[in-house]
Amino acid sequence: MFDRINQGYQTQQLYPIPSWVYEGVIYQIFPDRFAIGKGKTVHDKAKLYAKRGGRIVDWDVPPKRKDKAEHVKDFYGGDLWGIAEKLDYLKDLGVNVIYTNPIFLSPSNHKYDAIDYMRIDPQFGGERAFRYYVNKAKEEGFRLILDGVFNHLSSENPWFKKALKGDRRHVSKFAIHKDGHRAWYGHKALPEWHLEEVEVMEYILSVVEHYLRKGIDGWRLDVGYDLGYVNNALITKTAKEISIDKYVVTETWNYPSNWYMVDGIMNYHFRNSVIAYLKGEFNNLAKALQSAYNDTPNIYGCWNMLDSHDTERLATVIPDKQLRKLAIVLQFTYPGVPVIYYGTEIGLEGGNDPECRATMKWNEKEWDTDLREFYKKLIAIRKAQTALKIGTFEVLNEEPLVFYRRTPHVLDGIIVAVNKGKRAELNISLPDGRVLAGTCFVDLITNEEFWITGGIMKIDIPEKGFRILKIVNRPRNGYNQYKRIY
């Protein structure tokens, strides 16, 4: 970060990333599949779904793809009451930010087709549940992010229905032509907004402001690449006018550079690079991660993701848990905000949508408790180490991958090593003249010690293993060699 300020790259970023984001560990929740509150089952809530054409499904039945996307009408009963009741679980895990997929009135289980942005869907508990969720989460110290689906909406939206009938007050809000209307990826049930229409953008910005003033801390913008640079900038401007502390991240599936008008992006480039590397399908991870870091001024606000509601589950993509742990180590040690997709921490499996949207398992006997403890340990390390929040990213060795997170104070620095192959021994040159000879580095997981002299440190990395090495100052007989070094 510090060298790029000197080179002038930092000026490309329009707004400072909120300070709390650097401290953040995000937990993503698909509301229908996480938890049902108030002691109810989906059968107790059956009328909420049946009267709108939905079908209820028992909690332990895996979701399956159906013809004509009929699976979007399958409901499991999760709601905002349920999320609020599980905050203790999230606190124990160590996460401190919750991102929920859409919660607004919608005909589907995924809610990416809003009928009314100003109404919390009754299937999730409505406005009352939303207020309770926000208040309780705030009391417990959580930050909250909502999903803003502002590129398209539901064909059941009243304005769109009137536009189809030729109502001149609404027809300009959409791209309606002789043979139909413009829709997201051609899905006619998802008409796209005509965002260049002033009234449309004013309405969307009013939605952005409305929920920020109700206490949420930020927005994730769905299909941000479709919104384009200008509308991403307008939404961010609106959020920052309410408070510079509000956070906006946008969804893109491309290389992360050039989205400097938001606080960060969903970094699928990180995900795909790491997974391909660990599967032996990509040999340039070091260069890919270094280039993305160098080219992305707001990298610290980007999301380090390994799976999501739009991808296969991590446990399905990487069944080998030792290799999977290496992916998780990179997620928590590369610049950016770690994002855990609900259930990934207990080993939940699932293929592509809708299989990746299975219900959360609340029977602890079904958990991979070793994996969950591993997440807890890495979360605690990241939250405690300055280098993992703000440090630079400097590759020291390409294979096995070794990198340095340099910090303003030398004694906060961390070296991370990731080895997907056989046990490796190597000498690492650390290009930081502040690190003095005879300095000890301690593995934050195993407590093993490694020593540096002449800027060179010999380390070994276990097979399919890793190191997270922290500089430790060891004064001897009252002599502190770092007394005037910072």
Image (cartoon, rainbow, N blue to C red):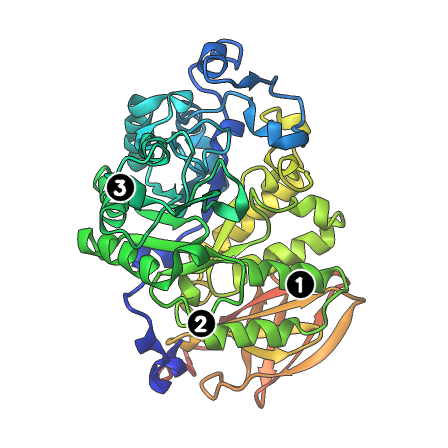
Coordinates of residue 246 in the picture (x, y in percent): 27, 52
Q: Which amino acid is tagged 1?
A: Phe
Residue reaching furthest to the right = 422
Asked whether, in this view, residue 417 is left or right of residue 206, the answer is right
Estimate how packed mark 1 is, as few (under 14), some (14 to 19) or many (20 or more) residues with alpha carbons within 10 Å.
many
Q: Which mark is residue 296?
A: 2
Which percent across, then down, holds residue 423?
78, 68
Query: Which of these two is toward me, 356 or 466?
Result: 356
Is residue 243 shown above or below 13? above
Residue 418 sits in which quadrant?
A: bottom right
Which label lies toward us, 2 or 1?
2
Residue 339, compared with residue 5, is above or below; it is above
**Residue receiving disc 3:** 207
**Location of residue 96 (image quadrant):** top left
Callout 3 secondary element: helix
The disc placed on residue 466 is: 1
Q: Residues under labels 3 and 1: Cα distance?
A: 45 Å
Q: Quadrant of the N terminus?
A: bottom left
Q: Which residue is at a point 47% across and 76% down the rendered structure image? A: 295
Q: Are marks 2 and 3 in contact (CB under 8 Å)?
A: no
Picture residue at 52% right of the left edge, 13% below the top: 41
Residue at the spot 42% in from the left edge and 64% down from the top edge: 300
Among the two numbered marks 2 and 3 on one chain, the one whose residue lies closer to the N terminus: 3
